[in-house]
Amino acid sequence: MDYAINQAGNTTVSALLDAVGASAEGLKAVWLSYPTAAFVPAAQFADELEVAEGTECLRTYGEGDCMADALYKVIGELRMATECTCTFGHEGGYQLHTIMGDACTKKGKPSDIALMRDLAPVMEKQAICGEGRAIGRVTIQALDLFAAEIEPHFAKRQCPTGGCEAFKTYHVLVSKCTGCGKCLKACDDGAILGKPKFVHVINQKKCTQCNQCLEACPEGAIVRAGAKKPKTPPKPIPVRRK
Ligand code: SF4
Ligand code: SF4
């Protein structure tokens, strides 16, 4: 969630959260926008930091948010904020944004982490614009602070928090399904198994996340899930709903 702030100088994230009326409970990190341009993990909320003049946004991240997706969006915003076309700021920013975009859409490669770790420090030093240098700096910071969340996107094509849209899965809730078959008809990918009066089941390997079944189900029986998946049967079973 984004909060507008207009406080510069030495302060703490806890004080900033208080000032905007937000609770720190359940937060794992915040982002302070450019020119501060920094992620701050929950463990450092009470530590003093310097907020640069002109920093207008504090963004909060809860447990279900993915920090790989957070980094992807932050790099994108920093790129949009500058018209600089220098090699390290513009091209470097493009490379890092593309790499993180791939990671968040199941296309990450293990070698990309090393590439980012090579490129980001050079950007931090060589980019001409402040935004370009910030992209390098926050990339290094995020890779260090949130390695356990970010690296599996590259090493295993997994999103540990389930926060990335591309990693979300679709499930039919046994408690709600009436076995009407509307989802099965709506699925063009043959990803749904079922027959009348049986709880339908979604084959995750075939599902392309098109959302058609979710829109077609009149019972609200289909849900999208992140890291926490509902318990569903491996194959269709007789409906339980009366
Ligand atoms: S999201 Fe699309 S592909 Fe996946 S099960 Fe539903 S209709 Fe089929
Ligand atoms: S999931 Fe919804 S649309 Fe599909 S069979 Fe069950 S009730 Fe019908």
Image: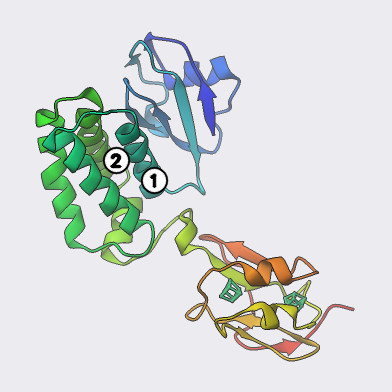
**Badge 1 is on which residue?**
67
Q: Quadrant of the C terminus?
A: bottom right
Q: Residues within 10 Å of mark 2 (few under 14, many from 20)?
A: many
Q: Quadrant of the N terminus?
A: top right
Residue 180 image position (x, y, % from top left): 80, 82
Ligand 2 found in image quarter: bottom right
Q: Residue at x 17, y 42 (%)?
A: 91
Numbered badge on residue 142:
2
Foreground: 64 or 26? Answer: 64
Residue 146 image position (x, y, % from top left): 32, 45
Is the C-beta of the residue carrying label 2 under 8 Å from the nearest atom of ligand 1?
A: no
Residue 123 image position (x, y, % from top left): 14, 35
Q: Residue at x 75, y 71 (%)?
A: 217
Amino acid under disc 1: Met
Please report contact status of discs 2 and 1: CB closer than 8 Å, yes or no: yes
Q: Would you say 181 lies left or right of 190 here?
A: right
Amino acid under disc 2: Ala
Instruction: Determine the secondary structure under disc 2.
Output: helix
